[in-house]
Image (cartoon, grey):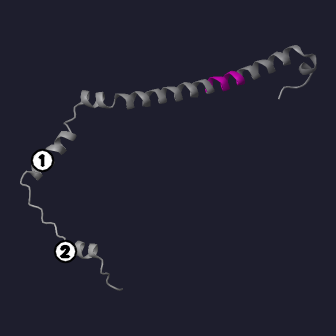
Amino acid sequence: MNPTHDPLTRLLESWRVDPSPDPGFRPAVLSRIAAGNPARDWPGYLRTHAALWTAAGLVILAAAVWTGHQAGHARNQADRSALLDTYIRNLDPRAMSRPQT
C-alpha cells in the first residue's frame, strides 16, 4: 500500500490524547448508579409497575370472559340439540316408530 502524503493523515498520526485522571470519577459513577436503582419495597414496586399489572390483569380478565362465553355457548348448543332431538322424537310419529339409537 502506498503511503499518502496527506497533511491530515500526518496530523492524526501525531495526535495523542493524555487526559488527566479525575479523582471524583468513580464516586460520581457509583452515585449515579445508586440514584438510578433506588431500593425497592413492595408499595414502591406497585406504584412503578401499576400500569403494567393493570394491563396484564385486564388482558387475563378479557381472556377468561371470552373463554367462559365460548364454553357457555358450546354447552348451550349441545343442550339445545339434545332438547330438540327429544322434542322431535316425542312429537313426530315417524320418529316415534323408529328405534332409538
The residue singled out by tag 2 in the image is: 14
In the picture, the disc for residue 61 is none
- Foreground of the two, 71 or 6: 6
| Left or right of residue 44, residue 81 in this image | right
Residue 97 among those drawn in magenta:
no
- Foreground of the two, 1 or 36: 1
Measured in 3D between alpha carbons, the distance from the residue under mark 2 to the one under mark 1, in whole angstroms, is 33 Å
Mark 2: which amino acid? Ser
Q: Residues within 10 Å of mark 1 (few under 14, many from 20)?
A: few
Residue 75 among those drawn in magenta:
yes
In the picture, the disc for residue 28 is 1
Q: Residue at x 11, y 52 (%)?
A: 25
Mark 1: which amino acid? Ala
Q: Please, is residue 17 above or below residue 99 in the view?
A: below
Q: Residue furthest left?
A: 23
Please give the range of residues in magenta. 71-78
- Foreground of the two, 14 or 67: 14
Q: Residue at x 15, y 49 (%)?
A: 29
Q: Secondary structure at mark 1?
A: helix
Q: Please, is residue 47 above or below residue 35 in the view?
A: above
Our reading of the magenta stretch's main secondary structure is: helix
Q: Earlier in the sequence, mark 2 or mark 1?
A: 2
Q: Where does the image place residue 74, in percent across and percent down from the top left?
A: 67, 26
Q: Where does the image place residue 10, in percent across and percent down from the top left?
A: 24, 76
Q: Where does the image place residue 80, in percent across and percent down from the top left?
A: 74, 20
Q: Residue at x 17, y 70 (%)?
A: 16
Q: Where does the image place residue 34, in percent across and percent down from the top left?
A: 17, 42
Q: Residues within 10 Å of mark 2 (few under 14, many from 20)?
A: few
Which quadrant of the view contains residue 92?
A: top right
Mark 2 or mark 1, whichever is nearer to me: 2
| Left or right of residue 8, residue 31 in this image | left
